[in-house]
Image: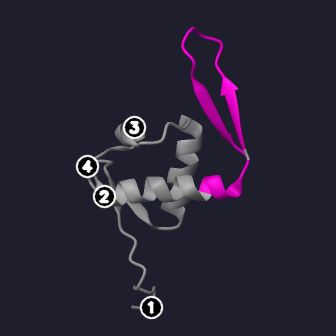
Amino acid sequence: MQKLIKQPKSKVVYKIECTNEKLLKKDILMVEKFIDKHTGDFKIRELFKNIPLRISWNYFKKIINHLLESRKIVYDSKNYLGYVWEENISEDD
């Protein structure tokens, strides 16, 4: 379930805290699809600033680490993120 927290400033800003696993999966898929669409265009900080969903930096790093560990994304020599996942390719090929 989502919790909305109102920030104590003049502007009304809401932060979504994730307590639901489905929301986590949704966010991972959103970041994954964004990287797939823009592969090689952004470094990690630029990517964080350009994703459509506003999430915390720590939460974003967890998503990136998950995608790196699952071998769906990689860094190139200049630290740009690239999407490399192919569903039909097995490790034996």
Between marks 4 and 1, how big is the CA–CA gap?
A: 30 Å
**Callout 3: SS:** helix
Q: Which of the two discs, 2 and 1, labels the residue nearer the N terminus?
A: 2
Amino acid type at circle 4 is Asp
Q: Which residue is mark 2?
A: 37
Q: Which residue is mark 3?
A: 45
**Callout 1: SS:** loop
**Callout 2: SS:** helix
Q: In this view of the protein, which residue sits in the foreground, 73 or 48?
A: 48
Q: Within 10 Å of the Cα at label 2, are there few (<14), some (14-19), or many (20+) other Cα atoms?
A: few
Q: Which residue is mark 1?
A: 92
Are discs 3 and 4 less than 8 Å apart at CB? no
Which stretch did the figure color magenta? Answer: 2-24
Front: mark 2 or 3: 2
Give above or below for 59 relative to 22. above
Q: Within 10 Å of the Cα at label 1, are there few (<14), some (14-19), or many (20+) other Cα atoms?
A: few
Q: Is residue 10 left or right of residue 74?
A: right
Are discs 2 and 3 less than 8 Å apart at CB? no
Q: In this view of the protein, which residue sits in the foreground, 78 or 7?
A: 7
Q: Residue furthest bottom?
A: 93
Are discs 4 and 1 less than 8 Å apart at CB? no
Between marks 2 and 1, how big is the CA–CA gap?
A: 27 Å
Measured from the top left, where is residue 13 in percent x and y?
A: 57, 22
